[in-house]
């Protein structure tokens, strides 16, 4: 079968799936900017910490400043999770240890030492958020494209707020709601459609990034009467990998491909064949060839490079009209 054979997709060959270098660079820049936005609260808190701490004349006086207690605990190396396991006495011991072992020896520079150690501990927290950032940005870009198509097509929809879990009606100014969406519901020519993000599919017993079902938001109820337990209601399931680093591209695809095969196998045992699809930001040559091969033999029903607007629009339009 020729590599350039026509299939019913905007992708005509494997090369078109590969992420161009300029898109990789743009992705890294976008990540860096977003990381800086995430760092703003920590930097501002450190400034306030320095301002208040500068009002005391010696390190041991810090322990008596109530506004500094949380800052001192953080600077002592304690995470927010660890604090729930400690008594107030334990926390005071930790603060005294910080003062005696690190702030006192710093002499007149004790305030700077306090700020450095505060930022050092918060760096771990920031790092944890940053590790999930690429995936989060990928989800937002996918959702923004999906919502744009709803808007252009005049399709009404409901969306589930990740903060309240409530289903809300479409709003005219939906410019930022992709940051809060965990589900979308709409109607098409074939019936009611439901897209759920990051859901554990009971039949698969694993998290699936994108699940499209035949049903309404009202059918997402607690317990085994929920639509998610009705295997025949699944129309399509997909994996979305937003990481832009080429070094991790193959690993992301291997993880996604294994997940998709597990999905197909689980449903096949019930004599069901929902469609499967893949969306990825970092796609290199070898994995592009494999993805394209899966498209040609219908193992995958759709695929898109997240950095390619035409492909992303195509897969979102396909999802809307399933």
Image: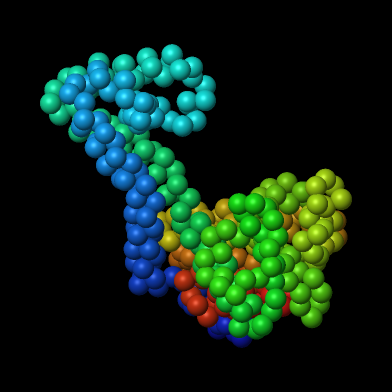
Q: Residue furthest left?
A: 108
Where 193 falls versus 52 (above or below)? Answer: below
Where 15 falls versus 90 (above or below)? Answer: below
Query: Residue 60, how many percent across, how many down?
Result: 24, 18
Position of 154 with respect to 116 (left or right) is right
The part of the image, by quadrant, that contains residue 194 is bottom right
Identify the residue at image location x=48%, y=60%: 137
Q: How many marks?
A: 0
Viewer-side residue, 19 vs 296: 19
Quadrant where the N terminus lies?
Answer: bottom right
- Asked whether residue 268 is in view, the answer is no
Query: Residue 306, how many percent across, how many down?
Result: 51, 69
Where 17 falls versus 10 (above or below)? Answer: above
- Asked whether residue 5 is in view, the answer is yes
Query: Residue 33, how many percent across, how many down?
Result: 35, 59
Quadrant where the C terminus lies?
Answer: bottom right
How is the rendered protein coloured? rainbow
Position of 289 with respect to 42 (left or right) is right
Identify the residue at image location x=35%, y=30%: 67
Identify the residue at image location x=32%, y=25%: 65
Query: Residue 91, how many percent across, how many down?
Result: 41, 19
Q: Residue furthest bottom?
A: 6
Viewer-side residue, 107 vs 62: 62
Viewer-side residue, 8 vs 47: 47
Identify the residue at image location x=21%, y=30%: 55
């Amino acid at each position: 079968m020729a590599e350039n054979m026509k299939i019913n997709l905007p992708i005509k060959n494997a090369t078109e799936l590969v992420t161009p270098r300029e898109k990789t660079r743009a992705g890294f820049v976008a990540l860096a900017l977003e990381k800086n936005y995430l760092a703003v609260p920590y930097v501002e808190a450190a400034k306030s910490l320095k301002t208040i701490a500068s009002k005391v004349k010696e390190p041991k006086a810090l322990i008596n400043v109530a506004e500094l207690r949380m800052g001192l605990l953080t600077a002592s190396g304690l995470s927010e999770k660890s604090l729930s396991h400690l008594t107030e006495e334990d926390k005071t011991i930790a603060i005294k240890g910080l003062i005696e072992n690190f702030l006192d020896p710093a002499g007149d520079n004790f305030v700077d030492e306090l700020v450095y150690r505060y930022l050092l501990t918060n760096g771990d927290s920031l790092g944890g958020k940053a590790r999930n950032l690429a995936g989060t940005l990928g989800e937002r870009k996918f959702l923004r494209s999906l919502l744009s198509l709803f808007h252009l097509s005049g399709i009404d929809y409901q969306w589930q707020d990740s903060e309240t879990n409530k289903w809300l009606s479409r709003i005219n100014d939906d410019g930022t709601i992709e940051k809060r969406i965990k589900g979308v519901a709409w109607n098409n020519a074939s019936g009611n459609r439901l897209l759920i993000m990051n859901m554990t599919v009971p039949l698969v017993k694993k998290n699936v990034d994108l699940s499209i079902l035949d049903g309404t938001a009202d059918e997402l109820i607690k317990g085994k009467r929920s639509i998610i337990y009705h295997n025949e209601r699944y129309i399509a399931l997909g994996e979305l990998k937003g990481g832009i680093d080429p070094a991790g591209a193959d690993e992301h695809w291997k993880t996604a491909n294994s997940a998709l095969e597990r999905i197909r196998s689980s449903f096949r045992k019930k004599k069901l064949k929902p469609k499967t699809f893949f969306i990825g930001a970092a796609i290199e040559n070898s994995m592009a060839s494999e993805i394209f091969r899966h498209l040609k033999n219908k193992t995958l029903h759709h695929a898109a490079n997240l950095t390619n607007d035409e492909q992303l629009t195509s897969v979102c339009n396909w999802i809307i009209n399933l």
